[in-house]
Image (cartoon, helix red, strand yellow):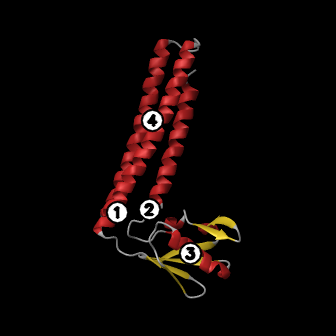
């Protein structure tokens, strides 16, 4: 009776965790990672296009990314998009290829990034709690409509709390791991 509500809430929580994981992947942690450029959008002939749909992005060295565009004429557009982004990287091109050298992170920038990770983790946890609250309201409505008993409602709320706790623990672990990666020199 109440199982579909818990399954639906669990599915939403999983999606929230996936969004959080993608946000973490796009944070710069001192080493080159092609996922770093996933959020870059380029104004390509009047259409905002994700950079990863316009080029091959590779990491030939630990501290460098190369962007090989399929349309070489778009190099200036891509350079402008990268410079406008919050990544703080300066692209260099040789007419065919764009190179991004990832500089060492200084202590101040590392601390800023860990604060950003904490803020994103908190936002994800708030979203998960909101999903829990919505499911709890559904249980109350079901109980008022006599679809489930008070005992079923308590069991359902306890089961939902276990799912919520697991999701929040997962987010905390991901955030801790990313913070450790950022602070590693």
Q: Taking 100 as reference, is 163 above or below it?
A: above
Q: Residue at x 48, y 23 (%)?
A: 156
- The residue pinned by badge 3 equals 80
Q: Taking 166 as reference, is 51 above or below it?
A: below
Q: Label 1 vs label 3: CA separation?
A: 26 Å
Which quadrant is home to the N terminus? Answer: top right
Q: Label 2 vs label 3: CA separation?
A: 19 Å
Q: Is residue 44 visible?
A: yes
Q: Label 2 vs label 1: CA separation?
A: 9 Å
Q: Taking 109 as reference, is 144 above or below it?
A: above
Of badges 4 and 3, nearer the viewer stands: 3
Chain-order first, disc 2 or disc 4: 2
Chain-order first, disc 4 or disc 1: 4
- The residue pinned by badge 2 equals 27
Q: Nearer the viewer, residue 121 or 9?
A: 121
Given contact means CB atoms under 8 Å apart, are the residues at marks 2 and 1 in contact?
Answer: yes
Q: Label 2 vs label 4: CA separation?
A: 24 Å
**Residue 159, percent from left and from top:** 45, 27
């Amino acid at each position: 009776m109440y199982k579909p509500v818990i399954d639906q809430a669990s599915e939403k929580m999983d999606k929230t965790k996936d969004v959080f994981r993608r946000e973490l992947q796009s944070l710069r942690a001192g080493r080159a990672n092609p996922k770093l450029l996933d959020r870059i959008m380029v104004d390509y002939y009047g259409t905002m296009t994700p950079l990863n749909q316009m080029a091959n992005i590779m990491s030939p060295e630990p501290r460098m990314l190369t962007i090989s565009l399929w349309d070489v004429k778009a190099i200036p557009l891509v350079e402008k998009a990268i410079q406008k982004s919050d990544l703080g990287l300066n692209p260099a091109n040789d007419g065919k290829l764009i190179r991004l050298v990832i500089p060492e992170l200084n202590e101040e920038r590392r601390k800023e990034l860990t604060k950003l990770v904490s803020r994103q983790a908190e936002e994800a946890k708030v979203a998960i709690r909101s999903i829990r609250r919505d499911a709890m309201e559904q249980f109350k409505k079901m109980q008022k409509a006599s679809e489930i008993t008070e005992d079923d409602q308590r069991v359902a709320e306890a089961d939902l709390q276990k799912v919520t706790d697991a999701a929040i623990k997962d987010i905390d672990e991901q955030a801790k791991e990313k913070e450790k990666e950022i602070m590693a020199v």
